[in-house]
Amino acid sequence: MNRLHTFLIYMVSMILVSFLVWFSLSRSDYRVLAFAACIPFALYFMNRPDTVLILAVGLMYSGVSFPGLPGALMAYHLFVLLYIGLWVLAVALRPQQIESRKFYAGILMLFLINIALVMYWRGAGFRFLGDRDWGGFRYVQILLALGFLLSSSYIKLTVRQWKIAMLLLSGLAMLPSLAEFLLLISRGRLYHLYYVVRLRSLTLTAFVASEDELGLVRFYSARSAGTALMMLAFMFVGFRGLRKYLFCAMMALSFGFIAFTGHRASILELAAFVWLYGFVNVRISYLNYILTSLLGLVLVLMVVYATAVHFPLPVQRAVSFLPNIQVDSVARDNAMETLEWRLNLWKEGWNELRNNPDYWVIGKGYTFSNEEMDALRLGRPGEYNYWWAVINTTYHNGPLSLLIGLGLSGLIIGSLILVAFSRRHYRFLKGHWESPRLKQFFHILCLYNLASIFVFFVIYGDAFNNYPVIIYRVAILEAIYFSDRKLKRDATRQAEVTTQEAEEPMPRMSLPPRFRSHV
């Protein structure tokens, strides 16, 4: 960081702190003063952009938040925002040092313009700016993810730093599951955990169901534990030697944790990832792999059909979509209720498009009326009123969510981003990598993201929940690739220096005069 860069940062920070202290004392608003107290920490991280990137990646699945943060804002959002700010500053001061991706930056900017037009036309949902509706944070989630992707080529981490980031990403993903488990077994006495871990509404649904002894209690946060075990198994254990037994145990636990959520789409997502990994890596013909996969699927289904009735109720719910399978009526009824709810919701979504042709052009947006939401809060938590989802623009279908929320242009550009980057990353998988470890990290995240994209388009997804998570992973993949490219450039430069030194002729030694006659 040069002197001008440092001087500008400290001058702007001093002015900002002074203004915030004056504002908070004049208004007696000590929240602003607390914000000013965080600025020294921000200054530290501004001088360590590599640490900012590590924490932005490592905290993504952790659910970690800080007391006083508004709404659903989490710690990793703050680090992503700081990282984007550092990138903007670097582009302003040293634009020639930032690697550009013109085509991909172009489609990202088109999507940003599309979102900006929808926000302008339909409302941004920021109450503190005087908007009547709610839901502004949904746009914040999408915009932060897109900004993170745009800035992903800024900082190149070392292999050791990426190992730390991936360990944090995998390990801290256990926190939501641990917090929910402790809350449920303590019957709510350990609610203090949610001062530092974001409390999800689905956790409250599980808590109410367990307290009322409704029979079917779904452990929603167990999905993060299953994802964490999967990433640890593939990235750091591997299927070789004696480690393969640990690998198999971790993958069995991963499927088990996700099955306890009762979420069928999550199970299919993990299964699609495992199948894709084998398809890319197993050294047999594609036909033999497909036939082997079908045989393995038949064996798994035989075991599931024979033992499903003995599974816990959330697991029975997860497999109840299989035809003629014997499961408890509570699990089957709950699964059928959500299926009918989703089909009615999708039908109503298409009715909205027919009744509102302007949605095709400018979209409906993702804001909602809190008064209408309050009027629809009927029945107990967990009951399925699809009108709630219609007003909330939560369609549980990726393409429909993009189409209704952002219009036809939003669907086309949003889909193009995923397809273009997926094609780019799959091409990188086949290329040469300087670091085998970085290639392994890239390999796992790329295939898992491809499975998530498949589920988003075909089975389940929302534009402001699932889409930003996919884009965050795309940004991480880009950052890993650019880090390896820097290693490759450094290795090439070092090889050139070594070659030049080897080719230089040895200097001829000049002998003293008294020795020359003897030579």
Image: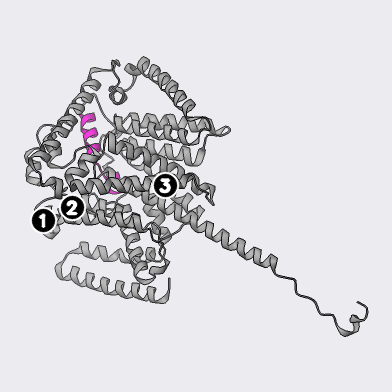
The main secondary structure of the magenta stretch is: helix
In the image, which residues are magenta?
193-211
Task: Determine the residue positioned at 30% across, 16% down.
Answer: 325
**Magenta-span inclusion, residue 334:** no
Q: Nearer the viewer, residue 486 or 250?
A: 486
Tag 1–tag 2 contact (CB < 8 Å): yes
25 sits left or right of 294 in the view = left
Amino acid type shown at disc 3: His
How far separated are the C-alphas under marks 3 and 2?
A: 31 Å
Q: CA distance from mark 1 to mark 2?
A: 9 Å
Tell me the kind of residue under disc 1.
Answer: Asp
Cα separation between marks 1 and 3: 40 Å
Query: Residue 131, labelled with which disc?
Result: 1
Q: Provide the residue designation for mark 3.
A: 425
- Tell me which label, 1 or 3, sits earlier in the chain: 1
Instruction: Tell whether position 197 is magenta.
Output: yes
